[in-house]
Image: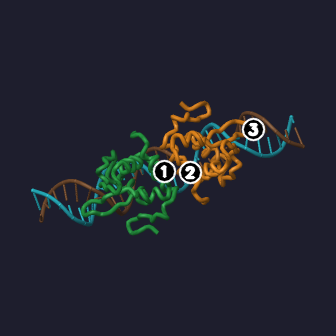
Chain colours: A green, B orange, C cyan, D brown
DNA sequence: CGATAGGTACGATCAATCTCGTACCTGCTG
DNA sequence: CAGCAGGTACGAGATTGATCGTACCTATCG
């Protein structure tokens, strides 16, 4: 059962939602940038400079969070997103490498 | 440039279309079943027994073909589909294992 | 030849989703 | 306190995609 903020537990991470989330180029870009950071790095949603409105950014981050790809934690004013690297690697070994290796678009 | 039947070459296989194709559970099922066969095995579209109409089956196989996941060759009356195992493995190492490991739904 | 089976093409429908504007909440910061 | 910046919630519009029925083509089989 997902927690209060909509994060699935490791066992609950399923391939369908993960692939659906990664099917979107903007969301792959977020995952790719997070994967390039040191492990555990957290960034605000807005720091990615996605070329869409704030409302759409929220939409994409919800998709990533509910699929289990990122973890979002409140930090005062803003909300920090970090990659669930170990969790994804445990469920789908190699998947992050594939996404991280994609050239920018 | 894709060939006459819509197959992209190895270099043309891109992550976006591949993930979009694999986002559908029916298409993952086809790939999973093909991955379980010996390499090079070819099956007709209808042999998968997908619970949808013929027209929809054609739609799904086109998505798989245009993404570069399967190769379809005419054989007289019917059309045989085979997994482009080596091509996918070359472009996205490990991806097929992830899909093949998914439990049936 | 006629019937049937495997597939495709086209058009329609319905659901999902990407996108946005607006309104709103919450902390900072002057 | 007033303003602003980061985010979310909600509802709307537009687009994509899954599904189907029908018509059609081609090869095989009786």
Q: Secondary structure at mark 3?
A: loop
Q: Are marks 2 and 3 on the same chain?
A: yes
Chain ID of residue with mark 1 = A
The residues bearing labels 2 and 3 have C-alpha atoms spaced at a distance of 32 Å
Q: Secondary structure at mark 2?
A: helix
Q: Are marks 1 and 3 on the same chain?
A: no
Q: Residue at x 73, y 40 (%)?
A: B78
Answer yes or no: do the residues labelled 1 and 3 have beta carbons within 8 Å?
no
The residue that disc 3 covers is B77
Looking at the picture, how far across and down is residue A55, in whole percent? Answer: 34, 54
Of circles 2 and 3, the one toward us is 2
The residue that disc 2 covers is B97
* Circle number at residue A94: 1
Of circles 1 and 3, the one toward us is 1
Q: Residue at x 66, y 44 (%)?
A: B39
The residues bearing labels 1 and 3 have C-alpha atoms spaced at a distance of 40 Å
Chain ID of residue with mark 2 = B
Q: Secondary structure at mark 1?
A: loop
Could you tell me which quadrant the C terminus of chain A lies in? top left
Residue A104 vertical placement versus A72 (above, below): above
């Amino acid at each position: 059962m997902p927690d209060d903020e909509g994060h699935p537990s490791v066992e609950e991470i399923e391939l369908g939602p993960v692939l659906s989330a990664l099917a979107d180029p903007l969301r792959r870009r977020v995952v790719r940038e997070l994967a390039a950071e040191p492990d555990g790095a957290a960034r605000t949603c807005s720091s990615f400079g996605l070329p869409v409105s704030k409302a759409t950014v929220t939409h994409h981050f919800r998709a990533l969070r509910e699929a289990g790809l990122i973890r979002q934690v409140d930090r005062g004013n803003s909300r920090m997103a970090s990659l669930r690297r170990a969790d994804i690697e445990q469920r789908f070994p190699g998947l992050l490498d594939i996404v991280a290796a994609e050239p920018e678009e």
